[in-house]
Image (cartoon, rainbow, N blue to C red):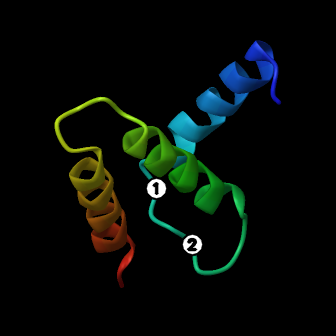
Amino acid sequence: MLSEAERAQLAQQDAVLLPMPLRAVGNPQFMGAHLRQVVLLLKGDGASPCREAVTYLTAVFERSAP
């Protein structure tokens, strides 16, 4: 388990990476940040967490496609 400080640090790092497109090669932190975001969306208490996750993933893939 991560400590609260480690979670906060990871959230700060993710905030920088999430607006960026996925990278085919390179730093696995990009994929980790997006994966953590999808998990948060799926754990959400909104009307449709799955729809929110799919909408997010669609946007990521659209901005990542060449």
Q: Residue at x 55, y 55 (%)?
A: 35
Secondary structure type for disc 2: loop
Give the residue displayed 43% in from the left and 38% down from the top: 43
Q: Of helix, strand and loop, which one carries label 1?
A: loop
Q: Which residue is mark 2?
A: 23
Query: Along the line of sight, which residue is nearer the eye, 17 or 49?
Result: 49
Q: Give the image location of residue 5, x and y in percent.
A: 78, 15
**Vertical placement of 51 versus 12: above or below?**
below
Is 62 placed left or right of 44 in the picture? left
Which residue corresponds to the image point at 35% horizontal and 72% vertical from the top-left? 61
Label 2: few (<14), some or many (≥20) within 10 Å? few
In the image, is 56 to the left or to the right of 28? left
Q: In front here: 50 or 20?
A: 50
Label drawn at residue 40: none
Mark seen at residue 20: 1
Residue 63: give x, y in percent of width and height.
32, 68
Amino acid under disc 1: Met
Label 1 Cα neighbours within 10 Å, binned few <14 / some 14-19 / many ≥20: few
1 is higher (above) or lower (below) than 26? above
